[in-house]
Image: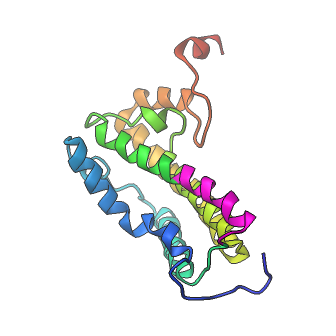
Amino acid sequence: MSLVPYFELGLWNAWIFMLYFPLHPLLFLLVDKAVGVGNIMKKMATPIYSTKTEKRIFYGFFLILVLAFIYSVFLPLQLGTAWFYVGLPIYLVGLLIIIVAIVNIATAPYGEPFTKGAYRYSRHPMYLGQILTLIGVTIASASWVFLLLSIALMILSHLVTIPEERLCLESYGDAYREYMDRTSRWIGIPKSSKNKRED
């Protein structure tokens, strides 16, 4: 990592890895159409952020994500270096988690919490996948500026999950409370019903 940020407009820059961000809604639509079940956006359309602070946190999260995308256009990947070869698999794991989570949302019954697939191991696999993709881009580009943006997004990701979980508790009640008891917020091994009774 260089102390002086290096800017270069190029075809093989980090924007290639960040394309999932603007294409995210398209990915939702493609999965929804392929799976042939209700509309994903309808499943996720409930307003979540009710206070000014929550809205500011969400807008801050979105703004930093946009800044990270814009910066990625000028951020060369460190192709052919150890940085790139370490960052690439981390990025791909994160992208895979995002795709699996989108499929899990699409196939979840309408009106029920998302608890299957990636949601079995994390209550927020979309954010987890996004964090891993950002870490992968940070390493693959060896950029301390992108690292700072990624750390800010990690902190804000944690903060935006709080109102989301509150809404899920209001919407799904005990079903979501039980899900929270057996599933870690970020990543973990789910507790079985048997283990839960022994605790």
Question: Which residue is nearer to you in this view: 38 or 199?
Answer: 38
Q: Can you say whether 117 is above or below 50 in the image?
A: above
The image quadrant where one finds the C terminus is top right
Q: Most prominent secondary structure in the magenta stretch?
A: helix
Q: What span is in magenta?
A: 79-94
Q: Position of residue 56 (x, y in %)?
A: 50, 69
State whether residue 40 appears in this view: no
Q: Can you say whether 56 is above or below 183 in the image?
A: below
Q: Is residue 92 magenta?
A: yes
- Residue projecting furthest to the front: 80
Q: Can you say whether 72 is above or below 104 in the image?
A: below
The image quadrant where one finds the N terminus is bottom right
- Left or right of 25 on screen, residue 3: right
* Residue at x-position 42% and y-position 43%: 100
Question: Which residue is nearer to you in this view: 182 or 54?
Answer: 182
* Residue at x-position 67% and y-position 65%: 84
Question: Which residue is nearer to you in this view: 180 or 98?
Answer: 98
Q: Position of residue 164 (x, y in %)?
A: 45, 49
Question: Which residue is nearer to you in this view: 153 or 130?
Answer: 130
Q: Position of residue 82 (x, y in %)?
A: 74, 63
Which coloring applies here?
A: rainbow
Q: Can you say whether 70 is above or below 33 in the image?
A: below
